[in-house]
Image: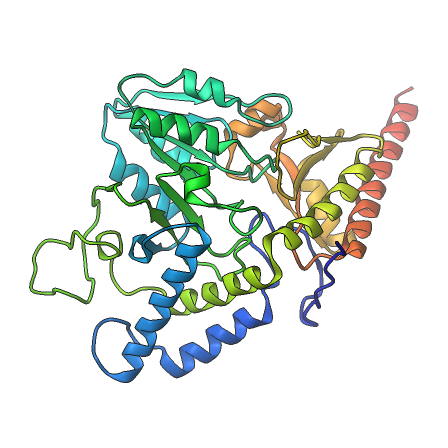
Amino acid sequence: MTLLHLPIPPEVKMIYLDNGATSFPKPQEVYTRMDTFYRSAGVNPGRSGFDLCLEAGSLVDDTRRLLCDFFGGTDPNRLVFGLNSTDALNLAIWGSLQPGDHVVTTHLEHNATLRPLWKLEQEGSPVDWVDFDATGYVDPAEVIRRFRPETKACVMNHASNVIGTVQDAATIGAACRERGIRFILDVSQSAGMVPVKMDELNADIVCFTGHKSLMGPMGIGGMYVREGVEVRRTRAGGTGVKSIQRQHLDEYPYRMEYGTPNLPGIAGLNAGVRWVNELGLSTIHHHEMVLWRRLRDALREIEGVRLYCAEDIPGRERISVLSFNVEGMEAADVGTMLDVDHNIACRTGLHCTPMVHEHLGTAAIHGAVRFGIGAFNHAEHIEAAIEGVREIAAGRRRRAAKLETTSA
């Protein structure tokens, strides 16, 4: 399988390796669809019966069907739109749990999951936090061991945004299904990189964002709720239908959607998912992981560079994010040097995942540097990143040697 070599728009002037935060650039089809659709049919869908309103509603319905199929769902109406994964996870968590309910989660979680669960914990909900091993994977048996008769939910991410490990969600989900425990899966990083199918993962709810590997714009995301699973409403508002009814609607998708939808975002997400489907997940993932392994193998040979959970483990999946530090340097300083001196964009800090960095021992040194490889990256980008890190590490060694000589 050959590597992709997708054209970079001329207005993109830097090497972008921050695709773990958001994919950039987007496929041209995404920009075009958002612009043309919003210009031609940018009206409020579902609120009236004129032609443009029906066209806008048709786009929303088409995107529901597209994503329902993408996630292996059975009812497009149970694909509900929101702002992003954080929004969806809040709806799923607060709509599934109440103070006092027992929850199991992991140390790999993003603050989108951690903070709602921390709040529940403060309000009296016992929460078990399962750690990951030295390779970056959570042992499903340890998660299952934490289940109690009173456990109401297991909430976890599918792929880590810091170390890139893809967890064995299917095994955990099967154990949840057997015990009547709700399994809420955060697929922010995995959707668009590896297959995410409800039945294969035994998920009750998957929460997604559109702006990462689904190649859509920011501000659009949502969740799919499996048939037979009900989420308690925690909001209420306009739906555009049954306006005489005082109580918010019970039926999906209106049950979990509130107010005017992000129509330009839905248009862009529609185009992004179609682009992903056309190229194929396996093609995109292969391309990104070939580049990832070249980057990983080269960085591990540079003196003073430390990688985190970057081993290939037989039978385990991973995605194309790579975190590292340069010995004796703040991650933020390395990121600034990559930007200013090498024209490379990356992410530094704690990546909204404090427990990951506490486990890795990087919280005390303000986190790590993260490269996130995407479909639009080329081999030349990876070579530039390798050279940039090599120069930064070499400069650090020279400064350290000079300081040692001066002190002597």
At x 70% / y 32%, what residue is drawn?
A: 312
At x 14% / y 54%, what residue is drawn?
A: 248
Coloring scheme of the render?
rainbow
Viewer-proximal residue, 211 or 140?
A: 140
Viewer-proximal residue, 111 or 264?
A: 264
Q: Is residue 395 left or right of residue 219?
A: right
Q: Identify the image quadrant of residue 4.
A: bottom right
At x 44% / y 50%, what residue is drawn?
A: 71
Q: Is residue 308 left or right of residue 242?
A: right
Quarter of the image containing the N terminus? Answer: bottom right
Residue 31: image location, x then y, percent: 53, 72
150, above or below 240, in the image: above
Viewer-proximal residue, 271 or 339?
A: 271
Residue 320: image location, x then y, percent: 65, 44
393, above or below 75, in the image: above
Residue 58: image location, x then y, percent: 33, 72
131, above or below 5, in the image: above
Q: Is residue 242 left or right of residue 335?
A: left
Count of numbered labels shown in the rendering: 0
For the question of whether residue 118 can be seen, the reply is: no
Quarter of the image containing the C terminus? Answer: top right
For the question of whether residue 318 can be seen, the reply is: yes
Residue 65: image location, x then y, percent: 38, 61
